[in-house]
């Protein structure tokens, strides 16, 4: 069995307070406090954002989670990743993928990215009508 790789650093790069809220939720649920760094685009020029993103990423492998696929955050992140093979970007981040990330950070980056995209998709559920398998008892 091979040794685990270096822990991947996560950066949640999103609009307004979204990044901080997601990172805080992950920390509260898991108790893990050092896996994710929040970064907001609020009132910051793209050139400054790119520099802040490089600082947050550090020297090792980094996975950047953005909130929207075609947003300014995603554009800045994707441009920053192009010259650096130690980085990857997932657009459309959600809480299920971030929770999975903190416990699987030593996977190779390409394997981790594929896993997290699957977890993110699996975490989405549409409920259009009552389901017979849901306990309707009063939770209080």
Image (cartoon, helix red, strand yellow):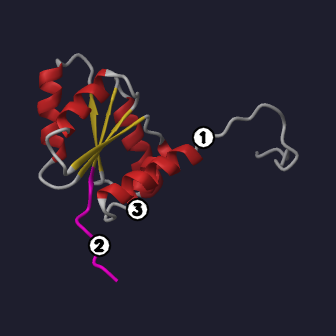
Q: What element carries label 3?
A: helix
How many numbered dots are placed on residues in this image? 3
Left or right: residue 97 versus residue 62 is right
| Disc assigned to residue 124 | 1
The x and y percentages for residue 119 are: 51, 51
Instruction: Check disc 3 and report the residue beneath it.
Output: 103
* Quadrant of the image occupied by residue 68: top left
Left or right: residue 118 versus residue 132 is left
- The answer, for residue 92, to whether it is visible in the render is yes
Task: Tell me if residue 45 is in the magenta stretch.
Answer: no
Q: Residues within 10 Å of mark 2 (few under 14, many from 20)?
A: few
Q: Do the residues labelled 1 and 2 touch (CB within 8 Å)?
A: no
- The answer, for residue 32, to whether it is visible in the render is no
Q: Is mark 1 on a helix, strand or loop?
A: loop
Q: Residues within 10 Å of mark 3 (few under 14, many from 20)?
A: few
Q: Pick whichever, 114 or 106, lies toward us.
A: 114
């Amino acid at each position: 069995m091979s040794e685990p790789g270096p822990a991947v650093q996560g950066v949640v790069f999103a609009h307004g307070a979204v990044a901080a809220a997601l990172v805080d939720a992950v920390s509260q649920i898991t108790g893990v406090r050092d896996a994710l760094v929040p970064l907001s685009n609020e009132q910051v020029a793209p050139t400054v954002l790119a520099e802040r993103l490089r600082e947050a990423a550090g020297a090792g492998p980094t996975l950047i989670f953005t909130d929207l696929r075609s947003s300014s955050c995603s554009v800045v992140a994707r441009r920053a990743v192009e010259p650096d093979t130690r980085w990857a970007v997932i657009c459309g981040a959600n809480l299920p993928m971030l929770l999975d990330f903190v416990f699987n950070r030593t996977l190779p980056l390409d394997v981790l990215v594929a896993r997290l995209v699957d977890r993110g998709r699996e975490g989405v559920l549409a409920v259009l009508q009552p389901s017979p398998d849901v306990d309707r008892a009063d939770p209080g």
